[in-house]
Image: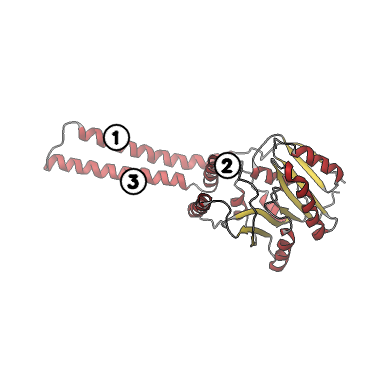
Amino acid sequence: MIDRPQLSVVATLYRSAAGLGEFHDRVTAAARALAGDSYEIVLVNDGSPDDSLDLAVAAADADPHLVVVDLSRNFGHHKAMMTGLDHARGEKIFLIDSDLEEDPAWLADFDRTMQSTQSDVVYGVQTRRKGGVFEQWSGEAFYGVFNWSTGLDLPRNLVTARLMTRRYVDALLLHREHEIFLAGLWQITGFAQTPVEVAKLSLSATSYSFRRKLGIFVDSITSFTNAPLVFIFHVGVTISFLALASILWLIINRLFLSPPQSGWTSVVASVWLVGGLNILFLGVIGIYLSKIFTETKRRPYTIVRRVHGRVEK
């Protein structure tokens, strides 16, 4: 039978070699202070191009509490985190980034909050979003559009760091869609969740380019709502209505007022009407196709090449 530790700490590795040693030391100290010797640290190598994997495997050889999950390639931050949660065995699971912008010492504060509030999740929110004016504005715009289009109330300025109970993580892992937007999954999984204000450091420039951020925005919206398809449908209805109204006006104008140039009326009216009906019908079909597409995706989050350091008992 596999012994279940009291605590699992989960983090991902991508270009993490420079700070990996310090991160391991600080996470170990925080985990020991909370759980004594009953803890594990799960590091997921997300196809890191530097020597993060070699350093992590060497650390796992020396530390029996450390487990390294090596993915077959880079799958993305969110998918790597879900893989780490899937490999975590603890009664409580602490998820955190490994870049040291999030302090492992937050674990103690999160645990005290969890006990006092009887929450299943305690998560960090930034007191002030890091970055310049554009990052501040784009972040607010994203949360506003996402919450409006999905009907969810996604907390603003979330950080990765969060402490979760076993039952919450088990419920979170029931979500199996391929396009993963973790902040949304965290929210729709439910349970009692309590925010804690934290001050996240800014030690390096973000690795998320504008193109990547735009891709995440599109994925998050399309994964949690069919609002874009409904919008297309409404556009089609509006165009069709305007086309019919225009046709009626053109007929009245031709019969009772000044006749337009020959041929213009029929061409414009037919283009508007057929174009509007095409958008209308494509919107309806798109809504059904989106449902089928969502239900038929059965791709894995990631592919694990090897797990280093874990000894099953």
Q: Earlier in the sequence, mark 3 or mark 1?
A: 3
Is 99 left or right of 250, judged from the image as shown?
right
User: Residue 64's spot in the image, x, y percent?
Assistant: 86, 47
Pointers 1 and 2 in contact (C-beta within 8 Å): no
Taking depth in this image into account, of 191 and 76 the one nearest to the observer is: 76
What secondary structure is marked by label 3? Answer: helix
Q: Residue beneath label 3, please?
A: 238
Q: Residue beneath label 2, please?
A: 295
Q: Is residue 309 visible?
A: no
User: Residue 202's spot in the image, x, y percent?
Assistant: 63, 51
* Whether residue 64 is situated above or below residue 155 in the rendered picture: above
Is 242 left or right of 98, judged from the image as shown?
left
Binning the other alpha carbons within 10 Å of mark 3 as few (below 14), some (14 to 19) or many (20 upward) gives some
Binning the other alpha carbons within 10 Å of mark 2 as few (below 14), some (14 to 19) or many (20 upward) gives few
Amino acid type at mark 1: Val
Q: Earlier in the sequence, mark 1 or mark 2?
A: 1
User: Residue 267's spot in the image, x, y percent?
Assistant: 24, 32
Residue positioned most to the top: 263
Amino acid type at mark 2: Glu
Is 62 left or right of 284, judged from the image as shown?
right
Q: Quadrant of residue 109?
A: bottom right
What secondary structure is marked by label 2? Answer: helix
Tell me the number on the disc at residue 271: 1
